[in-house]
Image: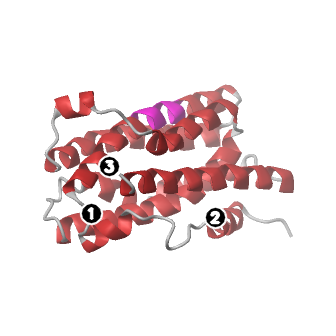
Amino acid sequence: MAVTARELVERITAELAPAKDANRLVPRIANGSATVHALAALALEQHHVIASDLRAFAFLADRSAGAGNSACAEFFGSLATGETLAQERLGAYAAACGLDADDVERYEPLAGCQAYPAYAAWLALNGEPPLVTLALTANFAAWGGYCATVAEALRGRYGFSDEACGFFDFFAEPSPDLERQALAAVASGVRTEAETALARRYGRLLQTYEAMFWNTLADR
């Protein structure tokens, strides 16, 4: 019996789920031992990540539309819109960390934190959109969980306002529409074991770069 897109997404997500100790920064934020400097660096790095991912997803949407894949075009278009909304929410978090526009402008991003968006941009140029969808969907499960933990800790441990936590709340909240779009995009082009294996590779590297992002900040 053929595997459904949902079954495939669930399987790859489970296979690529990070180990409990893969992320060294989020547990520190959760228990309140992370410094405000680390929280500020997180905001500054995300400023660059979001800007890059927005362009990568918009490019994937255009690529998909040009190839006649409306399911992938819809999914990546939604991701690009989401990055725009997240970018708008990031400012309140940065301000709560004591940052202003000059701080953002002067900041020099760290290579370990920018490996993820660099690879996402590579996927935008080189990956087949349905396979990239599967890889990203598996990664988003981990990212969303981290954001939920951070949002709770920012409120409970650091006294941040709801507005300041809006960036993390946005990614932590489930999106049935985006899930529907992701399943349709995966179904549009992940059909063989070879395609599944390549999508798994994409996802494995995304998860590795995700951990690198957090751990680069933890090791500063």
Q: Main secondary structure of the magenta part?
A: helix
Residue lying at 56% horizontally and 67% vertically, measured from the top left: 18
Q: Are marks 3 and 1 in contact (CB under 8 Å)?
A: no
Q: Which element carries disc 3, helix, strand or loop?
A: helix
Magenta span of residues: 51-58
Res. 104 image quadrant = top left
Q: Which element carries disc 1, helix, strand or loop?
A: loop
Q: Are marks 2 and 3 in contact (CB under 8 Å)?
A: no
Residue lying at 50% horizontally and 52% vertically, measured from the top left: 212
Q: Earlier in the sequence, mark 1 or mark 2?
A: 2
The amino acid sitting under disc 3 is Leu
Could you tell me residue 13's position as x and y percent? 62, 65
Does residue 13 show up?
yes
The quarter of the image holding the N terminus is bottom right
Question: In the figure, is residue 2 to the left or right of 50?
Answer: right
Front-most of residues 93 and 196: 93
The residue beneath circle 2 is 16
Q: How many marks?
A: 3
The furthest residue to the front: 220
**Cα–Cα gap, marks 3 and 1:** 11 Å
The residue beneath circle 1 is 34
Residue lying at 68% horizontally and 64% vertically, measured from the top left: 12
Nearer the observer: mark 1 or 2; the answer is 1
